Amino acid sequence: MKSTEVDAYLAGIPEGRRQRLQSFRSAVHASYPGVTESMKYKMPTFELAEKWVAMANQKQYVAIYFCCADLVEPIRKAHPELSIGVGCVRVKDTQPVPEDLLIQSVARALAVT
């Protein structure tokens, strides 16, 4: 279920980043129809069972946060060009968002076991 709070968050950010985050949002909802969407820590957050992923608009990039820091290691190996934090991936405005980042990483993050 989509949240009006997330709609408001997206409406207030620059167009280029809004499109990136909207694509991420759409991919999550398409892959996980039962996902719950809300704002947590001022970020759109998607929860399924007890797992979550979140996204955020930053000054010069978008960030995707994962519920488990272990989930970023495969991304670090596959995409050394990206800035990777302890539990997040940062994609600069000048970089394309890797397709597998959206598909495989979110699948691992929200996988219900």
Image (cartoon, grey):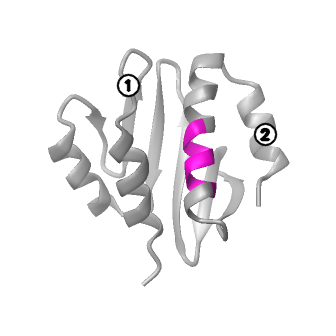
Disc 1 target residue = 96
85 within the magenta span: no
Q: Residue at x 70, y 58 (%)?
A: 37
Q: Position of residue 89 (x, y in %)?
A: 36, 41
On residue 7, the disc is 2
Horizontally, residue 20 falls left or right of residue 12, namely: left
Horizontally, residue 102 falls left or right of residue 58, namely: left
The residues colored magenta run: 23-29
Q: Amino acid at mark 1?
A: Pro
Q: Secondary structure at mark 1?
A: loop
Question: Furthest-right residue in view?
Answer: 4
* Dominant secondary structure of the residues highlighted in magenta in the image: helix
On residue 8, the disc is none
Q: Is residue 93 above or below residue 83?
A: above
Q: Position of residue 97 (x, y in %)?
A: 40, 32
Q: Residue at x 55, y 43 (%)?
A: 24
Q: Position of residue 92 (x, y in %)?
A: 39, 22
* Res. 113 in view: yes
Could you classify mark 1 by the number of other residues whose Cα lies within 10 Å: few (under 14), some (14-19), or many (20 or more)?
A: few
Q: Position of residue 76 (x, y in %)?
A: 21, 44
Q: Residue at x 54, y 51 (%)?
A: 54
Horizontally, residue 34 falls left or right of residue 78, namely: right
Q: Nearer the viewer, residue 58 or 108?
A: 108
Screen quadrant of the C terminus: bottom left
| Labels 2 and 1: the sequence-earlier one | 2
Q: Is residue 88 above or below residue 97?
A: below
Q: Is residue 36 above or below residue 53?
A: below
